[in-house]
Every structure is written in C-alpha cells, then in structure tokens.
Image: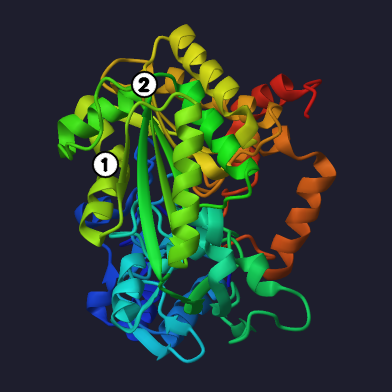
C-alpha cells in the first residue's frame, strides 16, 4: 500500500497510521498537535526548518522496529533524531515525514569494567557514560563541546569528535558493536564485543552514515582507564600564526597531546565577557590549550617540552593545571565558546571544515580575509591538533538577505578547506547544510558508489531522504550553480 503524502495529519489517510503507531508506543508516544510539533522542526542548524507530520517517541528496540515497519509498509519517509543538537541539519524533518525521536531511550543496559565496555541505548547523554564509570576509574573519550546535552545515538550518526579526538579518535574508534533497525523494520546486529571482528566492518560503515542506513538502538562502547596523570597548559600569544606554529612543532617533536585547541582574540573576549573564567587574557591574539596525559613521568617530561616549544614561538604566559578543578576551569571557556558567540551576536553560523594542521596560519588568514570581503565578523575556535576548524560567522538574521550572504560565505570557507587538501566536515556531518558541496570533494563515480551502499540498506530512500548526498529535491538550481563553480578547480 503506497502512501500518498498529505499536509493535514488529521486526514482519513493518516488515521490508520496514527492508530497503528499509538498501538506500538502508546498515545503519549505520538505527538501530532501542530503547536507541539514546532519543537521538532529543526536541529541545531536553526536556519533550516520543516515541521514533521508526526513525532514518535519509542522506548525499546522493538518499538523502533515496529515504527519503522509501519513507515515501510505505508512508504512514509522517516527521520531519526536524538537530542537535536546537530549542526548540519542531519535531523531536519522532511515534508510529511515521521520523526523518530530516541530521547526516551536512556538506559545503560550493561557495564562490563573487566572488558572495558558498556552497552547503552541511543538517548543516553554523552557525559552520562563517563559519569557512570568514573567512580571505577574509567571514562568515555569522545567529548563534543555539547557533551552535557548531546546523545550517543546522535554522536554515532554524525561520527562526532571533540577535544580528545586528537589522541583517542572520534566516535567510530570507540564503538564496538551496534543493534540496528534497518529501513524495512528488521533488527540486525553488527560488530560485537571485541575491537576487531571478522568480515566486513559494517559497524564502521554505519557510524557517520547520518541516519540514512537505519537507527542504532543499542550501542556497545569502549571505555578507557583514567590516565595516571593529566596536565592542562594554557599559553597565550600575540599572533594566531605563532599559536598555529606551536601546534605544528609540538606534533613534529613526537608528542601527541590528548587535545590541543586554539581560540582567537574575538572568541577569547566573547568567552571572558560571558563565562568570566579569569583565565583567558583578553589582549591576547590567540590562546593555545594543550592537555597532556599518561604516566606521571611522561606527562612531566612532555609538559617541559611543550612549554619550551611555546616559549620559542613567543608565548607570553603559560599557565599549567594538574588538579581536576583547575583543569576544568581552563577548559570551561573553550566548552562555552559557541554559547558565548550567541551572547555577542543575534545569530551565528558555525562551519566545520578540516585542513592539514601545517596550513593553519595560512587558512585562518584567508578565512578572516573572506569575512572582511563579505562584511561579516568571524570568530575562530577549533581543534588545532587535527586541523578541524569551527569558524563562527556572526550575523543578524533580521537583516534581509543576511542569511543568504552568510551561507555563501560558509560555502567559500568549505571550498577553501578542500582546496588546501582538507575536507568538508570533521565531526558535524554533511546533513542538509553541505550536501550540495559533496560534488566539490567527490567525483560522480565516488558519489555513485556511496549511493550503491545506501540503496542496499535503504532501497526506497525512506530513511532520512535528502541528506548527505546532493539531490535535485534539496539542492535545486543552487546545486547546479555550485557544481559549475567547482568545475576546473584543482584539488591538492
């Protein structure tokens, strides 16, 4: 039975669908009133909005599977959503879709400290995993800045990173296995409880697939033993180039910090005015945060070497912290950078490109020049160790045409990252924001090959349609214009 999408969810054709869904999750598990649906019309990329036809709130794998099966039988598109903190429009509803929200799936199903793994439902908040095991001396390494509110299911969908991804890797490096509901409603298990499983790496394929292959309903995570010693250094510089050069020199010396972050002066002042940590000198052009961990003797030696490198590159003051309270204070401003930008500008648009870290200074200079050319201020805060940039373009959406100009500027920044040998995304995903730019990084054969994979799991294109890949439905003439811009551009 093929479903004929209708705008009015009270229409006769919707009634059997609503009844079937209520049978699965209960009446309180189906949201259908228009004013309530407004809560779910966007994720963290608030410039794109679309109200879903229905929202379903399952609690178990079986309820997710039954919901997906109903959508499959009626050929209704559906979109998975976690906490809604994504920044690329990955959880943006499509017209007349069912939005499957995993926020009620918040159980820790198993903790196995001896084998260093936990099994969680997708609605578990990132930071809760560490809280559950920290008393026994363990932690979960991937730590996006939104870790106190973002969910593990969303982290899996976007392959999220965070401060510690430099040394410990992004989400895919910490997922051992998944229980999945695929788009026909079947339940399958991929991966397992061991780091390396024979056969195809379907776990790795699914992590970062942005909800286009199915929904993860149980996630087996690897947890790590808390290091013997941890030290955080904060160095301030009178030039952004000097801070970037320090990053290159630290890595070149053979030291791999747990994390390295840079904030420019604009971002420093915004953070201090908002959070008031008292740690970040407001006259500095840049600060570099370096976290070192490991054995005490290793941390002590690396601390001395990092300090020396920063001094050689012109660092004025270097603050170090070994105790937990002071370390958290040093990190507080960095974690609050996005929120701080919201306090100095009515709106901001954050991008997420990746470049080789040896080209940090050059790219940052060009980003600031692009901002000047377009007439917008840009605050830079980023994972310096792995070259994952997060430029925040500040603007006022109340000004007619501002969003279109900012979106164009964001595209120019992405093109710059790719031209410098980088990538369109490091951790925020492609979603609805960057899918039109995929032909800039990948040729037609690359994209066709990816579509083959999608069609194996999602042949009817019901799972998160219009995301990740460029399509006429989502990109229209804008896509054609952007592709024309990309032609003849040399990538290196």
Residue at the spot 58% in from the left edge and 50% down from the top edge: 255
Q: Which residue is mark 2?
A: 285
Residue 280 drawn above or below residue 189 = above
Q: Which residue is mark 1?
A: 333
Residue at the spot 32% in from the left edge and 28% down from the top edge: 267
Of discs 2 and 1, which sits in the foreground?
2
Q: Tag 1 or tag 2, which sits nearer the N-term?
A: 2
Q: Is residue 195 left or right of residue 68?
A: right
Residue count near mark 2 (Cα–Cα under 10 Å), binned few <14, some 14–19, many ≥20: many
Q: Quadrant of residue 213?
A: bottom right
Which residue is nearer to you in this view: 67 or 258?
Answer: 258
**Where does the image place residue 79, in percent across and percent down from the top left?**
47, 60
Q: Is residue 430 visible?
A: yes
Q: Quadrant of residue 337?
A: top left
Screen quadrant of the C terminus: top right
Q: CA distance from mark 2 to mark 1?
A: 16 Å
């Amino acid at each position: 039975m093929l479903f004929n999408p209708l705008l009015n969810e009270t229409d006769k054709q919707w009634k059997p669908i609503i009844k079937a869904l209520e049978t699965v999750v209960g009446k309180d598990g189906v949201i259908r009133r228009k004013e309530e649906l407004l809560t779910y019309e966007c994720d963290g990329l608030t410039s794109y909005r679309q109200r879903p036809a229905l929202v379903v709130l399952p609690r178990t794998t079986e309820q997710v599977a039954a919901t997906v099966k109903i959508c499959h039988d009626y050929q209704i598109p559906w979109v998975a959503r976690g906490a809604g903190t994504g920044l690329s429009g990955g959880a943006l509803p499509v017209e007349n879709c069912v939005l499957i929200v995993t926020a009620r799936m918040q159980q820790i199903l198993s903790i196995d400290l001896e084998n260093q793994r936990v099994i969680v439902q997708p609605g578990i908040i990132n930071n809760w995993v560490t809280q559950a095991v920290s008393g026994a001396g363990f932690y979960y390494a991937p730590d996006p800045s939104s870790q106190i509110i973002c969910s593990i299911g969303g982290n899996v969908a976007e392959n999220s990173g965070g401060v510690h991804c430099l040394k410990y890797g992004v989400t895919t490096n910490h997922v051992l296995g998944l229980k999945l509901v695929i788009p026909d409603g079947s339940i399958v298990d991929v991966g397992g409880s061991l780091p390396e499983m024979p056969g195809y790496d379907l776990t790795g394929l699914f992590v970062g697939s942005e909800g286009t292959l199915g929904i993860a309903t149980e996630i087996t995570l690897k947890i790590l033993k808390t290091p013997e010693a941890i030290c955080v250094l904060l160095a301030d510089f009178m030039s952004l180039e000097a801070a970037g050069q320090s990053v290159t020199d630290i890595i070149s010396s053979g030291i791999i910090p747990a994390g390295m972050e840079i904030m420019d002066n604009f971002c420093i002042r915004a953070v201090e005015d908002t959070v008031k940590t008292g740690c970040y000198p407001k006259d500095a052009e840049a600060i570099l945060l370096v976290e070192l961990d490991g054995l005490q003797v290793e941390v002590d030696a690396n601390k001395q070497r990092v300090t020396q490198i920063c001094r050689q590159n012109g660092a004025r003051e270097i603050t170090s912290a070994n105790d937990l309270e002071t370390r958290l204070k040093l990190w507080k401003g960095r974690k609050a950078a996005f929120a701080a930008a919201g306090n100095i500008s009515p709106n901001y648009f954050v991008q997420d490109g990746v470049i080789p870290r040896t080209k940090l200074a050059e790219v940052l200079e060009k980003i600031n020049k692009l901002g000047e050319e377009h007439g917008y201020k840009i605050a830079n805060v980023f994972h310096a160790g792995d070259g994952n940039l997060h430029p925040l373009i500040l603007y006022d959406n109340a000004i007619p045409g501002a969003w279109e100009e900012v979106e164009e500027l964001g595209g120019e920044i992405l093109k710059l990252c790719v031209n410098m040998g980088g990538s369109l995304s490091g951790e925020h995903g492609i979603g609805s924001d960057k899918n039109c730019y995929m032909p800039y990084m990948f040729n037609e054969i690359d994209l066709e090959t990816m579509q083959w994979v999608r069609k194996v799991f999602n042949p009817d294109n019901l799972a998160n349609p219009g995301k990740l890949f460029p399509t006429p439905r989502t990109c229209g003439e804008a896509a054609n214009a952007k592709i024309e811009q990309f032609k003849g551009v040399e990538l290196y």
